[in-house]
Image: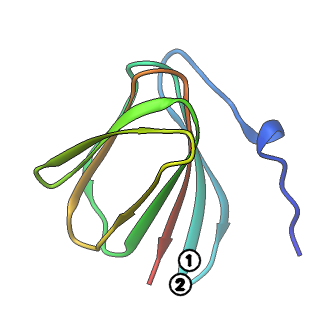
Amino acid sequence: MKLLSLEELKVFTASEFIKKELTVTEHFKLLLVCFEPGQAVPPCVMERSTAFYIIEGRGRVSVSDEEHTVSAGSIILIEPDLSRQIKAETRLVVLAMQYE
């Protein structure tokens, strides 16, 4: 068992978003991603299905040619092999899960 405190794990820098791997297995990866306003993950394509849970803040998520505003409590489910991007409008904390 592993018990994590997201409040203790959150880290922000002015220069770039921070990505922390919380757990990694052969079939699953759990990450905490922290953004300051204006920071973004560049568009990328993942081979695994991905879910983003917005813990706090507001931002924009783009998947292929769709873009949506997201905020605390939003869950985004993304199929593999699609281009995706996250951009923070406010300080943003995201729990990202990659799975098979």
Query: Residue at the spot x=88%, y=62% of the render?
Result: 3
Distance of mark 1 from mark 2, alpha carbons?
A: 4 Å
Mark 1 touches mark 2? (CB < 8 Å) = yes
Q: In this view, does 6 lie above or below 83?
A: above
Viewer-proximal residue, 73 or 11?
73
Q: Is residue 37 left or right of residue 53?
A: left
Q: Quadrant of residue 87?
A: top left
Picture coordinates of residue 52 (x, y %)?
47, 56
- Amino acid carrying mark 2 in the image: His
Density class for disc 2 (Cα within 10 Å; few <14, some 14-19, many ≥20) is: few
Picture coordinates of residue 85 (x, y %)?
29, 45
Q: Is residue 92 left or right of residue 86?
A: right
Task: Work out which quarter of the rendered image holds the N terminus and state it.
Answer: bottom right
Q: Quadrant of residue 86?
A: top left
**Residue 28 bears which disc, if any?**
1
Picture coordinates of residue 56 (x, y %)?
60, 35
Task: Say which element carries label 2.
Answer: loop
Viewer-proximal residue, 30 or 76?
76
- Amino acid carrying mark 1 in the image: Phe
Task: Say which element carries label 1.
Answer: strand
Q: Is residue 61 left or right of residue 34?
A: left
